[in-house]
């Protein structure tokens, strides 16, 4: 009888040890530093510099709140999708706790996402969604909402000024899910408000020279056009050059003014908005996106289960009248970059 009791006790101890061991392996650490691998597609734009700086800065503040230090390992793919996936593999080999990546190619990034998930490392897509393999979470601006709200605000401006719009749309790279969302938001508002008719849609592949040449050719084909929708004003220098060439670069209130709506409020677009050449911009808000990315990273490392959960920032609308009152405008914060 004694022997049987002893065996039962030993068996119970072994079971508890096994379960404790499994728990210790499976449960993520909730103390100690959080090592974040940050895999950029490119780093030649002040928006990306702002995202990185804002994330690192906020992680120091947020880390104090949750009692955990953040450590960052950062690499850049220089616009090469294959290299970006290799960089993600490198972060996996360094045993980071979580990966944040901004895709160069929305389809190709799926390979890197799968590799991270197979290794048991949570991965967050930032700004650009994956069109193939889904990450644990996506954090970014809500392109469809921002585009629609910008277009809705633009409709109000046109109606206030009694303008019947004939618009040229400069759309982005359709390999980028954001570019698709920008087009869809613009088209939705056009149908809903009837404040303009789009007479030409110009694909740019996010290449500044195509913004310029595309707008030049569209204005030659449609000299009656009086509006332009610029999917991202990072290329506004090329847009300005095309408008100047056509004699259409003038501030609001002047006879040759081209009524203009843009997305982003970049270092190229910000001065034109302040001066009145751009009438409205949907702000691609870097600060709240960076804040959310830092918080979501901690939640994933802490063990929260997410399955392609989306965290989207709606963004703000900026006009020449209100731009100076808006905080954390990255183009202003990084005016010299």
Image (cartoon, grey):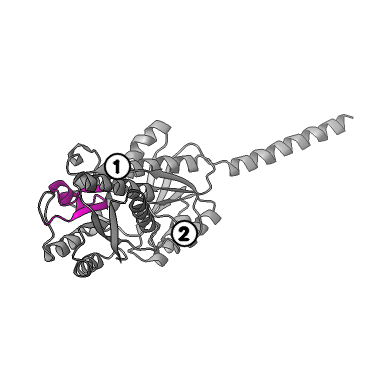
How many numbered dots are placed on residues in this image?
Answer: 2
Q: Which residue is mark 1?
A: 316
Q: Nearer the viewer, residue 219 or 300?
A: 219
Secondary structure at badge 1 equals loop
Q: Earlier in the sequence, mark 2 or mark 1?
A: 2
Q: Nearer the viewer, residue 197 or 74?
A: 197
Residue 130 placed where, x, y %?
45, 57
Let me know if residue 281 is in the magenta part.
yes
Can residue 141 be seen here?
Answer: no
Can residue 137 be seen here?
Answer: yes
User: Measuring 18% from the left and 65% from the top, which residue is drawn there?
Assistant: 223
| In this rendering, position of residue 159 left or right of residue 28 | left
Residue 250 placed where, x, y %?
11, 55
Residue 78 placed where, x, y %?
32, 63
Secondary structure at badge 2 equals loop
Q: Residue 131: which numbered mark, if any?
A: 2
C-alpha gap between disc 2 and disc 1: 26 Å
Q: Residue 191: which numbered mark, if any?
A: none
Q: Residues within 10 Å of mark 1 (few under 14, many from 20)?
A: some
| Magenta span | 256-282
User: Measuring 49% from the left and 60% from the top, which residue is drawn there?
Assistant: 132
Nearest-to-viewer mark from 2 and 1: 1
In this rendering, is residue 171 above or below 217?
above
**Quadrant of the drawing holding the N terminus:** top right
């Amino acid at each position: 009888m004694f022997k049987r009791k002893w065996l039962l006790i030993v068996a119970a101890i072994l079971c508890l040890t096994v379960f404790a061991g499994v728990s210790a392996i499976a449960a993520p650490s909730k103390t100690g530093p959080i090592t974040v691998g940050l895999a950029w597609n490119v780093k030649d734009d002040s928006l990306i510099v702002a995202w990185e700086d804002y994330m690192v800065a906020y992680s120091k503040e947020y880390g104090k709140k949750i009692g955990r230090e953040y450590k960052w390992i950062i690499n850049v793919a220089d616009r090469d999708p294959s290299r970006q996936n290799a960089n993600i593999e490198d972060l996996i080999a360094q045993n980071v706790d979580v990966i944040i990546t901004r895709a160069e190619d929305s389809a190709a990034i799926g390979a890197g996402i799968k590799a991270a998930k197979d290794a048991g490392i949570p991965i967050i897509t930032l700004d650009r969604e994956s069109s193939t393999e889904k990450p644990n979470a996506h954090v970014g601006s809500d392109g469809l909402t921002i585009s629609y709200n910008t277009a809705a605000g633009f409709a109000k401006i046109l109606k206030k000024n009694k303008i019947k719009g004939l618009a040229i749309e400069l759309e982005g790279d359709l390999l980028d899910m954001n570019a698709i969302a920008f087009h869809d938001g613009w088209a939705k508002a056009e149908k809903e408000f009837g404040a303009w008719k789009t007479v030409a849609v110009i694909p740019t592949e996010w290449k500044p020279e195509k913004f310029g040449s595309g707008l030049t050719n569209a204005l030659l084909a449609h000299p009656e056009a009086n509006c332009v929708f610029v999917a991202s004003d990072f290329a506004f220098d090329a847009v300005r050059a095309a408008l100047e060439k056509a004699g259409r670069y003038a501030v609001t209130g002047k006879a040759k003014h081209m009524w203009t709506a843009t997305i982003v409020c970049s270092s190229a677009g910000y001065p034109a908005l302040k001066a009145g050449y751009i009438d409205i911009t949907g702000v691609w808000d870097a600060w709240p996106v960076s804040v959310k990315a830092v918080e979501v990273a901690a939640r994933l490392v802490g063990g929260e289960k997410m399955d392609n959960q989306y965290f989207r920032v709606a963004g703000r609308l900026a006009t020449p009248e209100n731009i100076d009152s808006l905080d954390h405008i990255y183009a202003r914060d990084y005016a010299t970059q």
